[in-house]
Amino acid sequence: MKIKIIKNEGIYNDQNVVSFSSAFGCGKASWNRETPIEGREYYVELEIRDTVAWRKDVNKSDKKQYCIKKNRNSTIIVCEVETFFEHGCCNFKIGRSIFTLDIEGVPYPKGTFVEISSQNLILYDINL
């Protein structure tokens, strides 16, 4: 996914924290490399290191449109359930990007739009 760094927020818990914008909205996340350049665009992968749970961290969305937004200390991602794997992983789609999360509980069906809320979103620069 393509993002633009709005601001380097500082270092918290030994992680660079950034505010970013994308075609889907704005959020805040940890940056998994050296401090990025403000105003520069990067192609990134999304990750949430914690195992999330259906109907707790991942809930059905009333909206049927991809979105990223900030809510207090969390970033909320509205995305689509793509593929669920029996061993507790699920692929989610936001635009043309796919990301995988470790997840517990009973999944929503493929194609369901969900809201994922996390304080532990991490961005990885994929150097494109």
Image: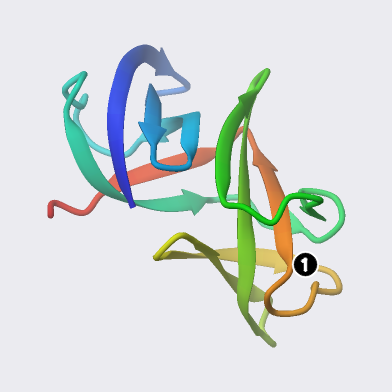
Residue 35 coordinates in the image, percent (x, y): 21, 24
- Residue 104 in which image quadrant: bottom right
- Horizontal relation, residue 40 to residue 22: left or right: left
State the image coordinates of residue 101 (x, y, percent, origin top left). Answer: 58, 63
SS category of the residue bearing label 1? strand
The answer to whether 38 appears left or right of 59 in the picture is: left
Q: Which residue is at the far front?
A: 64
Residue at point 58%, 32% (across, down): 69
Q: What kind of residue is marked 1?
A: Glu
Tell me how the rendering is colored.
rainbow
- In this view of the protein, which residue sits in the foreground, 25 or 33? 25
**Residue at 80% over, 73% down:** 107
Looking at the rendered structure, the number of numbered marks drawn on it comes to: 1
Quadrant for the C terminus in the image: bottom left
The residue tagged 1 is: 104
Asked if residue 124 is positioned above or below residue 55 in the image, the reply reads above
Q: Nearer the viewer, residue 12 or 29?
A: 29
Please determine whether, in this image, residue 94 is positioned above or below residue 122. below
Foreground: 112 or 128?
Answer: 112
Residue at horizontal 71 percent and vertical 49 percent from the top: 115
User: Does residue 83 lie above or below 81 as drawn?
Assistant: below
The residue shown at (57%, 51%) is 66
Residue 15 falls in which quadrant of the image? top left
- Which quarter of the picture shows residue 92? bottom right
Q: Residue furthest bottom?
A: 86
Q: Residues within 10 Å of mark 1 (few under 14, many from 20)?
A: some
Query: x%, y% of residue 47?
Result: 47, 52
Residue situated furthest left in the rendering: 128
Residue 65 placement (x, y as % from top left): 62, 52
Q: Where is 76 relative to 51, above or below?
A: above
